[in-house]
Amino acid sequence: MKTTTDVYTYLFQQSPHKDFWLDYHTECGVYLEEHGEMGIWIKSPFLVTSFDERPELEEMFVKGAKSRWNVFKENHNLYMVERAFRQTYLLSYLKENARTLTKEKINELIIDLWEDTESPGNSKETWNEIFKFLTPSLLDRSELPESEFKIYRGGELDGRSWTLSKEKGEWFAERFNELYEDYLFYEKTITADDVLFYTNGRDEQEVVLKESSLFSLMDECA
């Protein structure tokens, strides 16, 4: 059975596409992970796949990675980037290009990616940096009540994603309890001032809290 060292040696020294792999690794990074019977997986911004050195498969993988990488370099379409790497790429893109973009466009990029991200809480520090580019005052907040209102969350308390729907919050609590243990259901009362932004793009009536408001809620439960 091949080790990660064997695979790195093949990609960078023995593969007929070694020049591509070397350039790609230098620019984007190529990471290898062992997954037991599933073998070794290549994980990179424009390619995630199990390693297979059969010529026809490697040719297909290289062609696909090249195509997505080139499209991204031309128009910075984040959907060319593998999901696990999109937050990092958006943050880098905003740092380099925010001055040339409208605030509305920046908001659109951030919220579109947030809605596309499964479990954004796994990248809290990156999202905190991304949110520094957001302009909440330009976002639609018409769905938020003017007075105090209740929000709900199923999962760990320290997440910024809550919902206006009690039913949806309970659904998440049940979902996570099927996979893990001790996931709780929370109900809190807040005002619109506690909200960074609201989105219903996933039909979840999602309320994303300001970091300071989340800390206040956590202190209440301490």
Image (cartoon, rainbow, N blue to C red):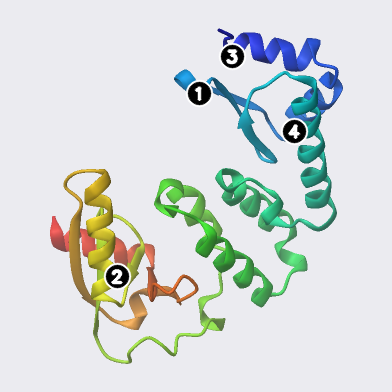
Assess disc 3: are there few (<14), some (14-19) or many (≥20) residues with their C-alpha within 10 Å of its C-alpha.
some
Tell which tag, 1 or 2, sits nearer the viewer.
Answer: 1
Residue 177 location (% of width, % of height): 22, 50
- Residue that label 4 marks: 61
**Could you tell me the amino acid type at mark 2?**
Lys
Question: Answer yes or no: do the residues labelled 3 and 1 have beta carbons within 8 Å?
Answer: no
Total numbered labels placed on residues in the image:
4
Residue found 84% across the figure and 46% down from its top: 70
Callout 1 secondary element? helix
Nearest to the observer: residue 187 or residue 192: 187
Instruction: Quadrant for residue 84, please give it.
Output: top right
Question: Answer yes or no: do the residues labelled 1 and 4 have beta carbons within 8 Å?
Answer: no
Q: Is residue 16 above or below residue 202?
A: above
Assess disc 4: are there few (<14), some (14-19) or many (≥20) residues with their C-alpha within 10 Å of its C-alpha.
some
**Residue 159 visible in the snapshot:** yes
Callout 3 secondary element? helix
Alpha-carbon span between mark 3 and mark 4: 18 Å
Nearest to the observer: residue 151 or residue 191: 151
Alpha-carbon span between mark 2 and mark 4: 39 Å
Residue found 58% across the figure and 66% down from its top: 112
Assess disc 1: are there few (<14), some (14-19) or many (≥20) residues with their C-alpha within 10 Å of its C-alpha.
few
Alpha-carbon span between mark 3 and mark 1: 13 Å
- Residue that label 1 marks: 38
**Could you tell me the amino acid type at mark 4?**
Phe
Assess disc 2: are there few (<14), some (14-19) or many (≥20) residues with their C-alpha within 10 Å of its C-alpha.
some
